[in-house]
Image (cartoon, rainbow, N blue to C red):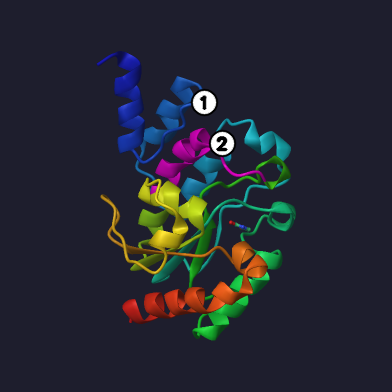
Amino acid sequence: MDDLQRVLEWFSDAGVSDVTADESRVRRETKKEVSSLAELREIVSKVDIPLKNCALNMVFGVGNENADILFLGEAPGAEEDKQGIPFVGQSGRLLDKMLAAVGLDRTKVYITNILPWRPPGNRTPTNQEIELFRPYVLKHIALVDPKAIICLGGTATKALLQTSEGIMRLRGKWARIDGVSARILPTFHPAYLLRSPSQKREAWLDFLTATEGTR
Ligand code: URA
């Protein structure tokens, strides 16, 4: 194993893989265990990636930091980019309604995304971007330590489960991955539900399953 690979493995063990930043800075940043969301937010804000040059704000996470259910979306859109808060646009308004339909709100759950910066033109995150941020997402999940994770849509599901299986096959089925104690339930993304309202019932059932599964 060469030196670079050893260093990268060491970063990854520390919960971070800031592969694009300069090595000595990343070494300093990751030497200490990341033990709070505030600390992780600081580290993520320093990830050196072109994506952030096109964005207005970093969108880290919102909600109850001790929540039993964590919602994982894909990436901020235009409104989230403006406000620096996940799911505050059209999709977010639908998400809020769906939460209310199962007796939840943003004070009871935690919400974050795979990417903390808006991809230009709302394009889908690239595999490289997903790979870069996945260790941070895993750290984010570990710090909140939820009982269940609801993956909103195909991109978040593929990124977290590292699968190429589509959301149509995966939704509504509990899954697990190594290193994450929470059970994972993929469902449809609110943006998809806005286009295909007939599928709202399935997503509502998934929200209900997750809520009941964490009681
Ligand atoms: N879509 C997402 O996946 N995340 C957001 O924060 C907003 C829209």
Along the viewing direction, whichever of 149 and 43 lies nearer the viewer = 149
Between the residue at mark 1 and the residue at mark 2, the CA separation in whole angstroms equals 9 Å
Q: Is residue 210 left or right of residue 176?
A: right
Q: Which residue is mark 1?
A: 21
Examine the rendered structure and indicate whether residue 165 appears above or below residue 94: above
Q: On the image, which quarter does residue 94 sit in?
A: bottom right
**Within-10-Å neighbours for mark 2: few <14, some 14–19, many 20+:** few
Which quarter holds ligand 1? Answer: bottom right
Residue type at tag 2: Lys
**Within-10-Å neighbours for mark 1: few <14, some 14–19, many 20+:** some
Question: Quarter of the image containing the N terminus?
Answer: top left
What percent of the width, then of the height, locates residue 99? 54, 78
Disc 2 is placed on an element classified as: loop
Span colored in magenta: 123-139
What percent of the width, then of the height, locates residue 5? 32, 20
- Residue 60 in magenta? no
| Residue at point 39%, 69% (across, down) | 172
| Residue at point 63%, 63% (across, down) | 191
**Whether residue 66 is visible:** no
Residue type at tag 1: Ala
Q: Which residue is mark 2?
A: 46
**Number of residue marks:** 2
What percent of the width, then of the height, locates residue 108? 49, 76
Q: Are marks 1 and 2 in contact (CB under 8 Å)?
A: yes
Sooner in the amino-acid sequence: mark 1 or mark 2: 1
Examine the rendered structure and indicate whether residue 79 appears above or below residue 57: below
